[in-house]
Image (spheres, helix red, strand yellow):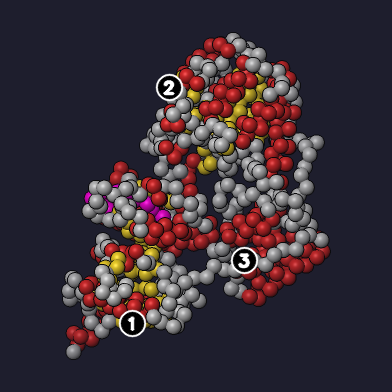
Amino acid sequence: MGIETYEVSHDWDLPGAGRDAVRFTDWLTGAAGVPAENVRLLLSPPARAGASPTQIPYPYRDATMANVKNVMFDELPDCEGDLLWIYWAGHGYIDTGDRLLLPYQDATQSLTHHFNLGSALRWWRSENVRRGRFPYQIAITDACRIDAASQSRLNFGAVDYGGKKTLPDRRQLILYASRPGELAENIPERGAGHFTDTLLKRLASKGLADSVWGFEGIARAVAADFAQARTTGLAWQHPEFVFERGWDGLPIFGHHWAGIPQPECAPCLDQQAWQELGGVLRGLELPPYAYDAYRWAFEISGCVPPATRALPATDLMDIARDLDQRYGRGRRLPLVLPFVRHLAGWSKDRTWAAVADAWVDATVTRMGTDPVSPAPRVPAEKPMLHIRLAADTQSDDRFWVRMWIHQAEGDFESLWESDRAMRLEEVRDRLAQEINAMASATDRNHCGVTRIEFDVPYGLLGEEFERWKLPIGRPNRPPRELGHHYEVVLRCLDERVGVAAESWRRKWEWLKTHGGQRAEAVRYLRDEDISTTLDLLLQKDAAPVCVIAEVSDTRVTETLDAVLDAGVPIAVWPRRHTPASAEGMEDTLTNLDDVRTLPAVVYHDRLTPRRRPLALLWDNPDRIPDNRFAVMAYEAQERRNEA
């Protein structure tokens, strides 16, 4: 099986997967001497790239669910054979039991049809296959092993082929291109998967007998090839070989063998270092920059970071243990040392930071490791303008207004507040005055503003503040759109109450500690996803922290209600009355690398012609100005009533 194109999306195109399946067919029917009629080739050829099916020298069928199931469970079990050889190149995911799920060519988002490799192999070991047939079975997959649960836009469902009693005399050797959670590298310029390319080089000169009976040795050699490649930064994945028992029936212990040449790598911490580190980290909660420290440890040590873009644990000692088991690139530097150095460098508790730095320095001296560089600087925050509008109890179109400057040091400074309720046109005029004043200010806390936050009542979420036109440019020039000069985001603090407030804070804590690169951080929604229980689904876990809603005008209100009820702090949705010629959201947001870059991404999107106008809710519970303003409008109204 080699699947290069999927019905799910053009983004799933995987150049080289089909070619890899053809290359395996070349080897099987060539050096291995397998009769061509014994081979079943299923492909999704790269038609989108203009390749012609006539360029494929073997008969093949489309790699659809119907064709694959027919081959695997109808045709092949009726054949007489000693060895079943399965090769699959394409996309891959794993379920909660680490079983590999391999989508078919005709998989879609709403019905992600897939081949469950674990269930299929159990079926092939069972009495469903007549006794005496296929006592030897090899399965090779060049596919990623990403958590299926993190793919919120896909619907894998449950696939189980059943199976009667398993037969102990059937032997299975399974080779995966990567560990659970890892990506498998594809090399488009070569038209090949890195794993397949490496394996075929080991098989190229071998006949069938040598390849089958010596398969354990070939697996060892491939493991060594990747171990060496990782030391030079040319690979990141860890091929995993699952041999329960060898062909002789004797047990093989996991995928670890003696005799594999090990690359020069960083030393592990000694017992004294671990004892001292336990005291340094005891009682310390996971800080919001933990993932930054984890990733920097790989970067400074020349080691390829895990493809999962996630912390391996939520306890700092467990994270340290994970780092201590990984290799650097030719440096004598345990990865735990730069991890702790970074934690110390970004900590606001300078007393603890001094203790942590002292532990790093003492460990370096005692163990004779390479020195540890100072931690990178904490990213400097630029000043931000925060505008709070509170509804007037006596009028539907007037609001009490207050403006703050959020300084780089993290404090709010009151800038201006109204002495009466104002219409939005008046608010716009006052905002223009403050922006022009800030532009000419010499106070560093009042200049360099890049973001404007509007904290508004629920009813104003539909107001297009980013499209407000203000006289903030050169004299005698047309007014400028606010969203063309600033990141304009919305907040709705009035709605962050009750159980929704608890979920809101919990989700933001998840974002801080896990970073914004994990797939489960984002939930993509379309009209068909909107339901009366959507808020419960969004609130159930700490993730998602962001909703990207490509919904129609009639579904916006329902979507926002679900977002606020669930406590989701970040959301993007299209503005109403979008021009028919505007492009969709998918081009810029479907493959979002990091949730934390959304304000900048949406800002740049607003500068692109024909983009769909977007609204961005960005509600950070750690950044709230003077809480007394929440009741200021009502107090003022009471004073006016008394007068």
586 or 268: nearer the viewer: 586
Element marked by disc 2: helix
The structure residue drawn at horizontal position 42% and vertical position 57%, both measured from the top left corner, is 601
Is 396 rendered above or below residue 28?
Answer: below
Closer to us: 123 or 428: 428
Magenta highlight range: 546-556
Residue 549 is left or right of residue 640, and the answer is: right
Is residue 507 visible in this depiction of the protein?
no
The answer to whether residue 545 is left or right of residue 248 is left
Residue 7 coordinates in the image, percent (x, y): 40, 32
Q: Quadrant of residue 634?
A: bottom left
Q: Secondary structure at mark 1?
A: strand
Numbered tag placed on residue 376 in the rendering:
3
User: Residue beneath label 2, please?
Assistant: 66
Q: Earlier in the sequence, mark 1 or mark 2?
A: 2
Q: Dot 3: what SS?
A: loop
Seen at 65% across and 76% down, the residue is 351
Where does label 1 land, which residue?
416
Q: Nearer the viewer, residue 313 or 407?
A: 407
- How far separated are the C-alphas under marks 1 and 2? 67 Å
Residue at left offset 32%, top offset 59%: 615
Position of the C terminus, as image quadrant, is bottom left
Label 3: few (<14), some (14–19) or many (≥20) C-alpha neighbours in 10 Å: few
Residue 76 in the image: state x and y as whole percent. 54, 15
User: What's under tag 1, amino acid-wise?
Assistant: Trp
Is residue 555 a member of the stretch shown in magenta? yes
